[in-house]
Image (cartoon, rainbow, N blue to C red):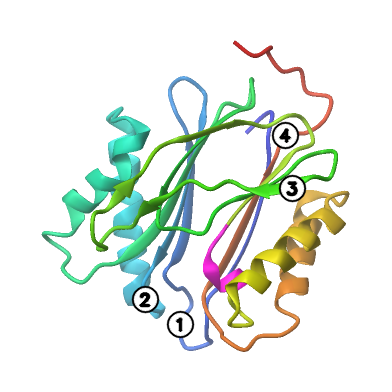
Amino acid sequence: MEGVELAVHYVPAGDDAPTGGDLYDWFTLPDGTLQITVVDAIGHGVESTRSALNVTHAVRTLVLERHPLESIVARTADTLVPTFRGLMATLQLARLDTRTGELRLANGGHPFPLLVRADGTARYLEAWGSGVGFPFPGSDAVLHDRLAPGDLLLLYTDGLTESRRDLDEGERLLMSSAQRHAHLPLPELIAAIVADLHSVILHADDTLLLGIRLPTGEPHAADG
């Protein structure tokens, strides 16, 4: 897709199954904006893959039917839970206008995305909500932000940050690693972050890390 760089790392938890419950999906909407979905279905192996696929397919359908972004998580739960009992999944929805950098996030109980600015500052984008199969599923609100050329957005599943069994430590390591490697080409940056965070693995889990960056030198429309 023109005007955006995207790279992804994905590894299932074990060697006994080729896939797991972590999944991502991206597509462009009719207006040209980029829709990205990251899902973490509870469980491992092919069964959890089936759950994650059900979630991503439901999200894609609801998005293309033009339901408001803030309603997608709750509507996904309403669609799937009555039929697929026991399905539980967290999900992160990101919608990016690559022409203006406008970013909107809806969250269903998923780890917060990390935003690393081109100047090296970084923060987690705290969009709150509850996932599919959990009590009161839905996004509490849609978080609005804006990416500038050179900014990096990282979407991931908790297998990346909980490999040491300490979520706070994992989030600190993720931020420092992303800042340290931000100068690298995006595929190399993603690989370097995974190497840093998985230098010690006390808790193996499916792992997904997806990076999005607006390249420098691209013209962007003014705010408004």
Answer with mark 4 or mark 3, whichever residue precedes in sequence: 3
The Cα atoms of the two marked residues, 4 and 1, are separated by 34 Å
Q: Is residue 192 visible?
A: yes
Measured as percent of width and height from the top left, residue 130 is found at 34, 55
| Outermost residue toward the left in this view | 82
Measured as percent of width and height from the top left, residue 67 is found at 28, 30
Dot 1: within a 10 Å radius of its alpha carbon, few (fewer than 14), some, or many (20 or more) residues? few
> Which mark identifies residue 17?
1
Name the magenta segment's main secondary structure. Answer: helix
Q: Magenta region: which residues?
A: 156-161
Q: Which residue is mark 3?
A: 122
Are dots 2 and 3 in contact, CB under 8 Å?
no
Q: Quadrant of the N terminus?
A: top right
* Eye-nearest disc, 3 or 1: 3
Are dots 2 and 4 in contact, CB under 8 Å?
no
The Cα atoms of the two marked residues, 3 and 1, are separated by 35 Å
Q: Quadrant of the C terminus?
A: top right
Tell me the quarter of the picture where residue 21 sits.
Answer: bottom left
Answer with mark 2 or mark 4, whichever residue precedes in sequence: 2
Measured as percent of width and height from the top left, residue 102 is found at 59, 26
> Looking at numbered disc 4 in the image, what kind of residue is underneath it?
Leu
Measured as percent of width and height from the top left, residue 129 is found at 37, 51
Answer with mark 1 or mark 2, whichever residue precedes in sequence: 1
> Which mark identifies residue 214?
4
Q: Which residue is mark 2?
A: 46
Tell me the quarter of the picture where residue 217 sits.
Answer: top right
The Cα atoms of the two marked residues, 2 and 4, are separated by 34 Å
Are dots 1 and 2 in contact, CB under 8 Å?
yes
> Looking at numbered disc 1 in the image, what kind of residue is underneath it?
Ala
The Cα atoms of the two marked residues, 2 and 3, are separated by 35 Å
